[in-house]
Image: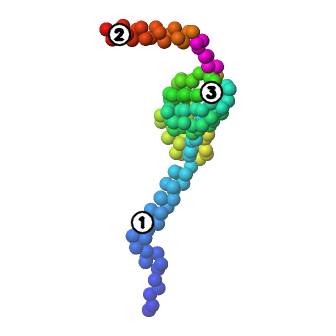
Amino acid sequence: MMQTKNPSRNRTPLSSFAIRAAILGCGFAAMLNSGCVRRTLTINTEPQGALVWLNDEEVGRSPVSTDFVWYGDYDVVARLDGYETLKTHHFIKSPWYQKPGIDFFSEILYPGKIHDQRSVDFALEPAVTPDRSELLERASEFRERSLFDEQ
């Protein structure tokens, strides 16, 4: 009597482990690819064209959009010829779906893409050129104070 081989019996435990690992790996890769949050900050100045730095990193001329990673306080510097340099802070508050605990679902498990777009406007003040006589008076006062401090 001839014995027929059962194909399911020929499978080794390693091959079934490999199949399970491949299925688990594909599921994990699909989960990693599912959620995504993109954060964009647009900085506008009046007048436009000011060179903008965000946390000591030049991001471009206004209006300028840049991606950001975290919510919180940002240093903003804007410079334009003929205008006073603007040095300020801007706080970006996190939305409800980025609160600790909930952010796991919005960043990892949520199947769609989320784009958090923020915009902030700054007005630049025209530069004030000091009067020549006022400038000379302030210089002489400074000179007198520095001579007094040396004694």
In this rendering, position of residue 1 left or right of residue 44 = left
In the rendered image, which quarter contains the N terminus?
Answer: bottom left
Image: magenta residue range: 124-132
Please provide percent x and percent y for residue 23: 49, 61
In this rendering, position of residue 140 left or right of residue 52 = left
Please give the name of the residue rendered at 55% of the width and 51% of the height, measured from the top-left corner: 33
User: Helix, strand, or loop for circle 1?
Assistant: helix
N-terminal of the pair, mark 1 or mark 3, is 1
- Closer to the camera, 96 or 79? 79
Q: Nearer the viewer, mark 1 or mark 2?
A: 2
Q: Main secondary structure of the magenta part?
A: loop
The quadrant where residue 53 appears:
top right
Q: Residue furthest right?
A: 47
| C-alpha distance separating marks 2 and 3 | 36 Å
Asked if residue 42 is among those painted magenta in the image, a careful observer would answer no
Residue 17 is tagged as 1
Residue 81 is tagged as 3
Residue type at mark 3 is Asp
Please provide percent x and percent y for residue 44: 65, 29
Q: Which residue was labeled with disc 2?
A: 149
